[in-house]
Amino acid sequence: MTEHCSHSDLTSCTQPSSEQVAIFLQQAADLCDKRNLRFTRLRKQVLELVCRAEQPVGAYHLLDELKQSGRSAAPPTVYRALDFLLEQGLVHRLSTNNTYLACAHPQHPHGAVFLVCSECGHTQEVHNEGVNDELDRQAKQFDFAIQHAAVEVTGLCSRCRGS
Amino acid sequence: MTEHCSHSDLTSCTQPSSEQVAIFLQQAADLCDKRNLRFTRLRKQVLELVCRAEQPVGAYHLLDELKQSGRSAAPPTVYRALDFLLEQGLVHRLSTNNTYLACAHPQHPHGAVFLVCSECGHTQEVHNEGVNDELDRQAKQFDFAIQHAAVEVTGLCSRCRGS
DNA sequence: CTATGTTATGTTATAATATAACATTATTTG
DNA sequence: CAAATAATGTTATATTATAACATAACATAG
Ligand SMILES: [Zn+2]
Ligand SMILES: [Zn+2]
Ligand SMILES: [Zn+2]
Ligand SMILES: [Zn+2]
Protein backbone atom coordinates (compact mmCIF):
# COMPACT_ATOMS: atom_id res chain seq x y z
CA MET A 1 0.00 0.00 0.00
CA THR A 2 2.79 2.42 0.79
CA GLU A 3 6.33 2.20 -0.43
CA HIS A 4 8.89 0.74 1.88
CA CYS A 5 9.76 2.95 4.80
CA SER A 6 12.20 2.13 7.55
CA HIS A 7 10.00 4.10 9.88
CA SER A 8 6.84 2.20 9.11
CA ASP A 9 6.93 0.86 12.63
CA LEU A 10 7.06 4.35 14.10
CA THR A 11 4.44 7.00 14.38
CA SER A 12 7.09 9.56 15.19
CA CYS A 13 10.79 9.98 14.71
CA THR A 14 11.28 11.22 18.22
CA GLN A 15 13.31 9.10 20.61
CA PRO A 16 14.72 6.80 17.97
CA SER A 17 17.81 4.68 18.45
CA SER A 18 21.13 5.87 17.11
CA GLU A 19 20.82 3.35 14.34
CA GLN A 20 17.37 4.59 13.39
CA VAL A 21 18.70 8.14 13.29
CA ALA A 22 21.51 7.05 11.00
CA ILE A 23 19.07 5.33 8.67
CA PHE A 24 16.84 8.38 8.68
CA LEU A 25 19.71 10.70 7.83
CA GLN A 26 20.77 8.39 5.00
CA GLN A 27 17.24 8.41 3.63
CA ALA A 28 17.25 12.20 3.79
CA ALA A 29 20.56 12.28 1.93
CA ASP A 30 19.21 9.94 -0.74
CA LEU A 31 16.04 11.97 -1.09
CA CYS A 32 18.01 15.20 -1.59
CA ASP A 33 20.26 13.44 -4.05
CA LYS A 34 17.28 12.27 -6.05
CA ARG A 35 15.95 15.83 -6.11
CA ASN A 36 19.33 17.33 -6.98
CA LEU A 37 19.44 19.29 -3.78
CA ARG A 38 22.36 19.74 -1.43
CA PHE A 39 22.16 17.93 1.87
CA THR A 40 24.81 20.15 3.37
CA ARG A 41 26.58 19.65 6.65
CA LEU A 42 24.44 22.32 8.31
CA ARG A 43 21.18 20.82 7.06
CA LYS A 44 22.25 17.38 8.14
CA GLN A 45 23.30 18.67 11.54
CA VAL A 46 19.98 20.44 12.12
CA LEU A 47 18.00 17.43 10.98
CA GLU A 48 19.96 15.20 13.30
CA LEU A 49 19.32 17.53 16.23
CA VAL A 50 15.60 17.59 15.47
CA CYS A 51 15.56 13.84 15.07
CA ARG A 52 17.38 13.12 18.31
CA ALA A 53 15.19 15.44 20.35
CA GLU A 54 12.83 13.67 22.67
CA GLN A 55 10.15 16.19 21.90
CA PRO A 56 9.50 18.77 19.22
CA VAL A 57 12.09 21.52 19.64
CA GLY A 58 12.10 25.26 19.22
CA ALA A 59 14.35 27.07 16.76
CA TYR A 60 16.33 28.81 19.48
CA HIS A 61 16.93 25.56 21.28
CA LEU A 62 18.43 24.20 18.08
CA LEU A 63 20.43 27.38 17.75
CA ASP A 64 21.92 26.85 21.20
CA GLU A 65 22.85 23.30 20.33
CA LEU A 66 24.47 24.43 17.09
CA LYS A 67 26.53 26.97 18.99
CA GLN A 68 27.55 24.39 21.58
CA SER A 69 28.76 22.17 18.79
CA GLY A 70 31.30 24.86 17.99
CA ARG A 71 29.65 26.09 14.83
CA SER A 72 29.10 29.77 14.20
CA ALA A 73 25.36 30.25 14.20
CA ALA A 74 22.73 32.98 14.33
CA PRO A 75 18.94 32.82 13.97
CA PRO A 76 19.00 32.80 10.14
CA THR A 77 21.34 29.83 10.26
CA VAL A 78 18.77 27.61 11.87
CA TYR A 79 15.68 29.09 10.23
CA ARG A 80 17.14 28.62 6.76
CA ALA A 81 18.01 25.03 7.46
CA LEU A 82 14.56 24.41 8.93
CA ASP A 83 12.89 26.03 5.92
CA PHE A 84 14.78 23.71 3.63
CA LEU A 85 13.86 20.65 5.68
CA LEU A 86 10.23 21.75 5.81
CA GLU A 87 10.10 22.21 2.05
CA GLN A 88 11.49 18.74 1.54
CA GLY A 89 9.00 17.26 3.98
CA LEU A 90 11.72 16.04 6.32
CA VAL A 91 10.40 17.94 9.30
CA HIS A 92 7.07 19.37 10.39
CA ARG A 93 6.39 22.60 12.19
CA LEU A 94 3.81 22.76 14.95
CA SER A 95 2.25 26.18 14.85
CA THR A 96 0.50 25.78 18.19
CA ASN A 97 3.80 25.79 20.07
CA ASN A 98 6.32 26.95 17.46
CA THR A 99 8.32 23.75 17.44
CA TYR A 100 9.78 21.40 14.88
CA LEU A 101 9.90 17.62 14.72
CA ALA A 102 11.22 15.05 12.29
CA CYS A 103 8.65 13.60 9.93
CA ALA A 104 7.87 9.96 10.49
CA HIS A 105 7.32 9.27 6.78
CA PRO A 106 9.26 11.66 4.60
CA GLN A 107 9.05 9.38 1.57
CA HIS A 108 5.59 10.47 0.58
CA PRO A 109 3.76 13.73 1.16
CA HIS A 110 0.88 13.46 3.56
CA GLY A 111 -1.46 15.33 5.80
CA ALA A 112 -0.73 14.46 9.37
CA VAL A 113 -2.47 14.76 12.70
CA PHE A 114 -0.40 15.67 15.73
CA LEU A 115 -1.38 14.71 19.25
CA VAL A 116 0.54 17.15 21.44
CA CYS A 117 0.67 16.61 25.20
CA SER A 118 0.35 19.95 26.95
CA GLU A 119 2.00 18.54 30.05
CA CYS A 120 5.13 16.75 28.86
CA GLY A 121 5.30 17.90 25.24
CA HIS A 122 5.33 14.40 23.88
CA THR A 123 3.96 14.50 20.36
CA GLN A 124 2.56 11.71 18.27
CA GLU A 125 2.35 12.02 14.50
CA VAL A 126 -0.47 9.98 13.07
CA HIS A 127 -1.81 9.74 9.56
CA ASN A 128 -5.56 9.78 9.47
CA GLU A 129 -7.13 9.39 6.05
CA GLY A 130 -10.58 9.94 7.50
CA VAL A 131 -9.62 13.46 8.57
CA ASN A 132 -7.95 14.18 5.25
CA ASP A 133 -10.96 12.95 3.28
CA GLU A 134 -13.29 15.00 5.38
CA LEU A 135 -11.19 18.14 4.93
CA ASP A 136 -10.99 17.54 1.18
CA ARG A 137 -14.75 17.18 1.04
CA GLN A 138 -15.25 20.32 3.11
CA ALA A 139 -12.80 22.28 0.95
CA LYS A 140 -14.53 21.17 -2.25
CA GLN A 141 -17.83 22.37 -0.85
CA PHE A 142 -16.36 25.85 -0.45
CA ASP A 143 -14.42 25.71 -3.70
CA PHE A 144 -11.26 26.01 -1.64
CA ALA A 145 -7.91 24.66 -2.92
CA ILE A 146 -5.99 23.20 -0.01
CA GLN A 147 -2.29 23.94 0.22
CA HIS A 148 -1.63 22.69 3.70
CA ALA A 149 -3.68 21.37 6.59
CA ALA A 150 -2.43 21.87 10.12
CA VAL A 151 -4.24 19.50 12.45
CA GLU A 152 -2.79 19.91 15.91
CA VAL A 153 -4.60 18.35 18.82
CA THR A 154 -3.57 19.48 22.28
CA GLY A 155 -4.38 17.38 25.32
CA LEU A 156 -2.97 14.98 27.89
CA CYS A 157 -1.16 11.79 26.98
CA SER A 158 -1.93 8.62 28.91
CA ARG A 159 1.32 8.81 30.82
CA CYS A 160 0.57 12.30 32.11
CA ARG A 161 -2.91 11.25 33.19
CA GLY A 162 -1.39 8.33 35.06
CA SER A 163 -3.87 5.93 33.55
CA MET B 1 -30.66 20.46 16.46
CA THR B 2 -28.73 23.42 17.79
CA GLU B 3 -30.12 26.11 20.00
CA HIS B 4 -31.20 29.31 18.39
CA CYS B 5 -28.34 31.43 17.14
CA SER B 6 -28.62 34.71 15.34
CA HIS B 7 -25.56 33.74 13.41
CA SER B 8 -26.90 30.44 12.19
CA ASP B 9 -26.94 31.88 8.70
CA LEU B 10 -23.26 32.75 8.91
CA THR B 11 -20.21 30.57 8.88
CA SER B 12 -18.14 33.44 10.14
CA CYS B 13 -18.67 36.69 11.96
CA THR B 14 -16.40 38.59 9.60
CA GLN B 15 -17.96 41.27 7.43
CA PRO B 16 -21.25 41.40 9.26
CA SER B 17 -23.64 44.30 9.07
CA SER B 18 -23.69 46.87 11.86
CA GLU B 19 -26.90 45.36 13.09
CA GLN B 20 -25.39 41.88 13.21
CA VAL B 21 -22.44 43.24 15.16
CA ALA B 22 -24.79 44.86 17.64
CA ILE B 23 -26.69 41.60 18.11
CA PHE B 24 -23.45 39.71 18.53
CA LEU B 25 -22.20 42.14 21.17
CA GLN B 26 -25.51 41.88 23.01
CA GLN B 27 -25.25 38.09 22.98
CA ALA B 28 -21.73 38.36 24.36
CA ALA B 29 -22.95 40.66 27.11
CA ASP B 30 -25.75 38.24 27.99
CA LEU B 31 -23.39 35.32 28.02
CA CYS B 32 -20.99 37.09 30.39
CA ASP B 33 -23.90 38.09 32.56
CA LYS B 34 -25.07 34.50 32.76
CA ARG B 35 -21.56 33.45 33.79
CA ASN B 36 -21.17 36.26 36.29
CA LEU B 37 -18.27 37.75 34.39
CA ARG B 38 -17.65 41.38 33.56
CA PHE B 39 -18.12 42.40 29.96
CA THR B 40 -16.09 45.56 30.49
CA ARG B 41 -15.76 48.46 28.10
CA LEU B 42 -12.32 47.26 27.03
CA ARG B 43 -13.46 43.71 26.37
CA LYS B 44 -16.46 44.94 24.44
CA GLN B 45 -14.33 47.31 22.42
CA VAL B 46 -11.83 44.59 21.50
CA LEU B 47 -14.59 42.15 20.59
CA GLU B 48 -16.22 44.77 18.41
CA LEU B 49 -12.93 45.45 16.61
CA VAL B 50 -12.39 41.75 16.01
CA CYS B 51 -15.95 41.34 14.85
CA ARG B 52 -15.87 44.28 12.43
CA ALA B 53 -12.59 43.19 10.86
CA GLU B 54 -12.95 41.85 7.36
CA GLN B 55 -10.35 39.22 8.12
CA PRO B 56 -8.78 37.70 11.20
CA VAL B 57 -6.64 40.38 12.82
CA GLY B 58 -3.35 40.41 14.68
CA ALA B 59 -3.02 41.60 18.27
CA TYR B 60 -0.86 44.57 17.33
CA HIS B 61 -3.34 45.67 14.70
CA LEU B 62 -6.00 45.71 17.40
CA LEU B 63 -3.59 47.58 19.63
CA ASP B 64 -3.18 50.30 16.99
CA GLU B 65 -6.92 50.62 16.67
CA LEU B 66 -7.34 50.88 20.42
CA LYS B 67 -4.75 53.64 20.53
CA GLN B 68 -6.41 55.46 17.65
CA SER B 69 -9.67 55.35 19.56
CA GLY B 70 -8.00 57.51 22.20
CA ARG B 71 -7.63 54.81 24.82
CA SER B 72 -4.39 54.24 26.61
CA ALA B 73 -3.18 50.84 25.49
CA ALA B 74 -0.11 48.62 25.55
CA PRO B 75 0.37 45.00 24.50
CA PRO B 76 -0.97 43.54 27.76
CA THR B 77 -4.13 45.57 27.28
CA VAL B 78 -5.09 43.74 24.15
CA TYR B 79 -3.68 40.34 25.09
CA ARG B 80 -5.61 40.28 28.34
CA ALA B 81 -8.84 41.17 26.61
CA LEU B 82 -8.20 38.55 23.93
CA ASP B 83 -7.42 35.93 26.56
CA PHE B 84 -10.72 36.63 28.23
CA LEU B 85 -12.64 36.44 24.97
CA LEU B 86 -10.84 33.22 24.04
CA GLU B 87 -11.70 31.64 27.39
CA GLN B 88 -15.35 32.54 26.91
CA GLY B 89 -15.35 31.12 23.38
CA LEU B 90 -16.20 34.49 21.85
CA VAL B 91 -13.15 34.55 19.61
CA HIS B 92 -10.80 32.00 18.11
CA ARG B 93 -7.07 32.25 17.65
CA LEU B 94 -5.46 30.99 14.45
CA SER B 95 -2.02 29.71 15.36
CA THR B 96 -0.89 29.42 11.75
CA ASN B 97 -0.90 33.18 11.30
CA ASN B 98 -1.25 34.52 14.85
CA THR B 99 -4.60 36.17 14.28
CA TYR B 100 -7.93 36.36 16.04
CA LEU B 101 -11.47 36.21 14.72
CA ALA B 102 -14.95 36.32 16.21
CA CYS B 103 -16.57 32.97 16.74
CA ALA B 104 -19.55 32.27 14.55
CA HIS B 105 -21.35 30.25 17.23
CA PRO B 106 -20.32 31.32 20.71
CA GLN B 107 -23.44 29.78 22.28
CA HIS B 108 -22.07 26.28 22.35
CA PRO B 109 -18.52 25.01 22.54
CA HIS B 110 -17.35 23.31 19.42
CA GLY B 111 -14.39 22.12 17.45
CA ALA B 112 -14.08 24.18 14.33
CA VAL B 113 -12.29 23.91 11.02
CA PHE B 114 -10.83 27.08 9.52
CA LEU B 115 -10.28 27.52 5.80
CA VAL B 116 -7.67 30.28 5.57
CA CYS B 117 -6.89 31.87 2.21
CA SER B 118 -3.16 32.44 1.96
CA GLU B 119 -3.68 35.12 -0.65
CA CYS B 120 -6.40 37.40 0.72
CA GLY B 121 -6.61 36.19 4.30
CA HIS B 122 -10.31 35.50 4.08
CA THR B 123 -11.18 32.84 6.62
CA GLN B 124 -14.17 30.59 6.82
CA GLU B 125 -15.15 28.91 10.06
CA VAL B 126 -16.94 25.64 9.50
CA HIS B 127 -18.11 23.01 11.91
CA ASN B 128 -17.34 19.54 10.71
CA GLU B 129 -18.55 16.74 12.91
CA GLY B 130 -16.85 14.19 10.70
CA VAL B 131 -13.45 15.66 11.53
CA ASN B 132 -14.28 15.90 15.22
CA ASP B 133 -15.48 12.30 15.36
CA GLU B 134 -12.40 11.10 13.59
CA LEU B 135 -10.11 13.02 15.95
CA ASP B 136 -12.00 11.67 18.96
CA ARG B 137 -11.60 8.16 17.61
CA GLN B 138 -7.91 8.70 16.96
CA ALA B 139 -7.36 10.17 20.41
CA LYS B 140 -9.13 7.26 22.08
CA GLN B 141 -6.88 4.87 20.22
CA PHE B 142 -3.84 6.54 21.77
CA ASP B 143 -5.49 7.01 25.15
CA PHE B 144 -5.15 10.74 24.63
CA ALA B 145 -7.49 13.23 26.35
CA ILE B 146 -8.22 16.07 23.97
CA GLN B 147 -8.23 19.59 25.37
CA HIS B 148 -8.30 21.53 22.13
CA ALA B 149 -8.09 20.73 18.44
CA ALA B 150 -6.66 23.31 16.06
CA VAL B 151 -7.67 22.45 12.53
CA GLU B 152 -6.40 25.18 10.24
CA VAL B 153 -6.44 24.59 6.51
CA THR B 154 -4.41 26.97 4.39
CA GLY B 155 -5.11 27.33 0.68
CA LEU B 156 -6.69 29.52 -1.97
CA CYS B 157 -10.28 30.66 -1.86
CA SER B 158 -12.37 30.56 -5.02
CA ARG B 159 -12.18 34.31 -5.44
CA CYS B 160 -8.38 34.30 -5.40
CA ARG B 161 -8.26 31.48 -7.93
CA GLY B 162 -10.58 33.44 -10.19
CA SER B 163 -12.80 30.42 -10.68
C1' DC C 1 41.76 24.81 -14.47
C1' DT C 2 40.04 29.39 -14.28
C1' DA C 3 36.01 32.44 -14.98
C1' DT C 4 31.40 33.06 -13.94
C1' DG C 5 26.97 32.33 -12.17
C1' DT C 6 24.43 30.19 -8.55
C1' DT C 7 23.49 28.45 -4.11
C1' DA C 8 24.47 28.40 0.69
C1' DT C 9 26.17 30.46 4.79
C1' DG C 10 27.88 34.28 7.89
C1' DT C 11 26.73 38.50 10.17
C1' DT C 12 24.34 42.45 11.94
C1' DA C 13 20.32 44.54 12.76
C1' DT C 14 15.51 44.66 13.45
C1' DA C 15 10.58 43.18 13.07
C1' DA C 16 6.68 40.79 15.02
C1' DT C 17 4.49 38.35 18.69
C1' DA C 18 3.85 37.66 23.58
C1' DT C 19 4.57 37.81 28.70
C1' DA C 20 6.52 39.20 33.51
C1' DA C 21 6.17 42.17 37.19
C1' DC C 22 4.37 45.57 39.76
C1' DA C 23 1.45 49.95 40.41
C1' DT C 24 -3.07 51.84 40.14
C1' DT C 25 -7.95 51.93 39.59
C1' DA C 26 -12.57 50.00 39.63
C1' DT C 27 -15.83 46.84 41.43
C1' DT C 28 -17.85 43.77 44.70
C1' DT C 29 -18.94 42.24 49.30
C1' DG C 30 -19.36 42.43 54.17
C1' DC D 1 -17.06 52.70 54.64
C1' DA D 2 -13.37 49.00 54.73
C1' DA D 3 -11.41 45.12 52.89
C1' DA D 4 -10.98 41.94 49.33
C1' DT D 5 -11.09 40.95 44.57
C1' DA D 6 -10.84 41.85 39.77
C1' DA D 7 -9.40 44.67 35.99
C1' DT D 8 -6.43 47.88 33.85
C1' DG D 9 -2.19 50.84 33.39
C1' DT D 10 2.69 50.92 32.76
C1' DT D 11 7.42 49.62 32.01
C1' DA D 12 10.43 46.36 30.76
C1' DT D 13 11.69 42.21 28.59
C1' DA D 14 11.20 37.54 26.53
C1' DT D 15 10.39 34.81 22.45
C1' DT D 16 10.00 33.92 17.62
C1' DA D 17 11.21 35.25 13.02
C1' DT D 18 12.96 37.97 9.00
C1' DA D 19 15.49 41.76 6.23
C1' DA D 20 19.56 43.04 4.17
C1' DC D 21 23.93 42.61 2.70
C1' DA D 22 28.69 40.33 2.81
C1' DT D 23 31.31 36.21 2.13
C1' DA D 24 32.14 31.48 1.01
C1' DA D 25 31.27 27.11 -1.33
C1' DC D 26 29.88 24.81 -5.25
C1' DA D 27 28.70 23.92 -10.19
C1' DT D 28 29.18 24.53 -15.03
C1' DA D 29 31.01 26.31 -19.27
C1' DG D 30 34.68 27.78 -21.88
ZN1 LIG E 1 5.16 13.46 8.55
ZN1 LIG F 1 2.30 13.86 28.54
ZN1 LIG G 1 -16.46 29.21 16.63
ZN1 LIG H 1 -8.57 34.56 -1.17
Image (spheres, coloured by chain):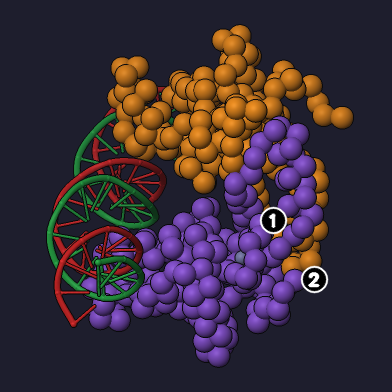
Chain colours: A purple, B orange, C red, D green
State which chain disc 2 sits on: A
Residue B74 is situated, as x and y percent measured from the top left of the image, at 31, 33
Q: Which of marks 2 and 1 is in front?
A: 2
Q: In the image as oriented, which residue stretches furthest toward the right?
A: B1
Mark 1 lies on residue: B146
Residue closer to the observer: C17 or B114: B114
Residue closer to the observer: B46 or B39: B46
Mark 2 lies on residue: A1
Residue B160 is situated, as x and y percent measured from the top left of the image, at 56, 30
At x 64% / y 40%, what residue is drawn? Answer: A145
At x 66% / y 60%, what residue is drawn? Answer: A110
Up/down of A59 relative to A12, above or below: above
Residue B108 is situated, as x and y percent measured from the top left of the image, at 73, 33
Rendered-image quadrant of the C terminus of chain A: bottom right
Identify the element where label 2 is drawn.
Answer: loop
Q: How crowded is mark 2: few (under 14 residues within 10 Å), some or many (20 or more)?
A: few
Up/down of A159 relative to A140, above or below: below
Residue D17 is situated, as x and y percent measured from the top left of the image, at 38, 52
Amino acid at circle 2: Met
Query: How many numbered marks have been drawn onto this rendered protein structure?
Result: 2
Q: How crowded is mark 1: few (under 14 residues within 10 Å), some or many (20 or more)?
A: some
Amino acid at circle 1: Ile
Q: Which mark is residue B103?
A: none
**Observer able to see residue B24:** yes
Rendered-image quadrant of the N terminus of chain A: bottom right
At x 73% / y 45%, what residue is drawn? Answer: A136
**Observer able to see residue B89:** no
Up/down of A128 relative to A3, above or below: above
Residues at marks 2 and 1, CA–CA distance in whole angstroms:
30 Å
Image position of B114 (left or right of A46): right
